[in-house]
Image (spheres, grey):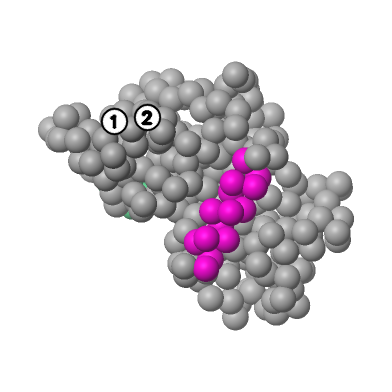
Amino acid sequence: MQAVMEITGLTKMYKNGRGIRDMDLTVHQGDIFGLLGPNGAGKTTAMKLITGLIKPDRGGVRLFGADVQENMVQAMKHVGCIIETAESFPYLTANDNLKQFARYYPEVDQARIDECLEWTGLIKYKHEKAGKFSLGMKQRLGVAAAILSRPKLLIMDEPLNGLDVEGMLAMRKLIKHLAEEGTTFLISSHLIHDVELTCNRIGVVYNGKLVHVEYTDKILSDYSSLENYFVSEVERNGRV
Ligand SMILES: Nc1ncnc2c1ncn2[C@@H]1O[C@H](COP(=O)(O)OP(=O)(O)OP(=O)(O)O)[C@@H](O)[C@H]1O
């Protein structure tokens, strides 16, 4: 199995003593990998480091074999991401927003834009301005923009933020559909149930540490629920 992402010794401590410490992780092609942890555990920090938005104190990240620090353009070539809230141009329609993003990718045409609007349930709002969208709709537009160029790796920070039940189901379906087509995912969430239903591998993040990584099937057969596993991992490793 090819390693899409290799993280070694990744450390970034803020001045207040919080952050991420000594993170090691390999994500393989086809994984829907979930970083599960409570608010403030360090998930967003990890994702910002992984995508080169902030610099680590030590350690590193390789995406598709390229070092994010040394060769950002190559490392991010096949990566789509939504970190924190999805940004859009408020005075442009959904369609025109995607056309703006499409300018970076010569191969993305109107048919591809329509396909992404369809998949994210936005096709009927195609000509409405993004500024008027609800949080959930903005989130969907962010996903549409992130998948436009058919990235091989999608990094999504709390992708279900702001989505209603229907939106969550649609998002999960979309993630599974793209994974079946070969897209690898790194998703962060504090929603245990959602991670259980969406991800095939899970890493528990607690107090800035990746305390354990395991396959979802194995967790469910050993612990009967992800919640039991999470509590047991936090009890065993997390508390300091
Ligand atoms: N720029 C910063 N300066 C100082 N501390 C920070 C900074 N960014 C984050 N932190 C702190 O680092 C810790 C980890 O934050 P991070 O945003 O990575 O957590 P998270 O797991 O993504 O949480 P959430 O689910 O709430 O988004 C938190 O305690 C946060 O207060």
Nearer-the-camera pick, 58 or 20: 20
Q: CA distance from mark 2 to mark 1?
A: 6 Å
| Quarter assignment of residue 35 | top left
Q: Position of residue 90 (x, y in %)?
A: 63, 74
Q: Nearer the viewer, residue 129 or 204?
A: 204
On residue 195, the disc is none
* Amino acid type indicated by mark 2: Lys
Give the percent coordinates (x, y) of residue 88. 62, 65
Tell me whether the residue at label 2 lies in contact with that at label 1, contact meaning CB atoms closer than 8 angstroms: yes
Q: Is residue 86 visible?
A: no
Residue 150 relative to residue 205: left or right: right
State whether residue 86 is above or below residue 208: below
Residue 134 to residue 156: above or below: below
Q: Quadrant of the N terminus?
A: top right
Query: Does 168 lie within the magenta span?
Result: yes
| Residue drawn where x is 52% and y is 68% of the image | 166
| Res 30 visible | yes
Q: Residue at x 44, y 48 (%)?
A: 197
The residue carrying mark 1 is 222
Q: Is residue 143 left or right of residue 35?
A: right
Q: Residue at x 47, y 58 (%)?
A: 160
* Residue 81 point in image, percent of width and height: 58, 47
Q: Residues within 10 Å of mark 2 (few under 14, many from 20)?
A: few
Q: Residue at x 23, y 33 (%)?
A: 233
Total numbered badges shown on the rendered structure:
2
Which stretch appears magenta? 166-179
Q: Report the front residue among 87 and 205.
A: 205
Up-down: is 72 above or below 155? above
Q: Which mark is residue 218?
A: 2
Q: Is residue 13 left or right of residue 187?
A: left
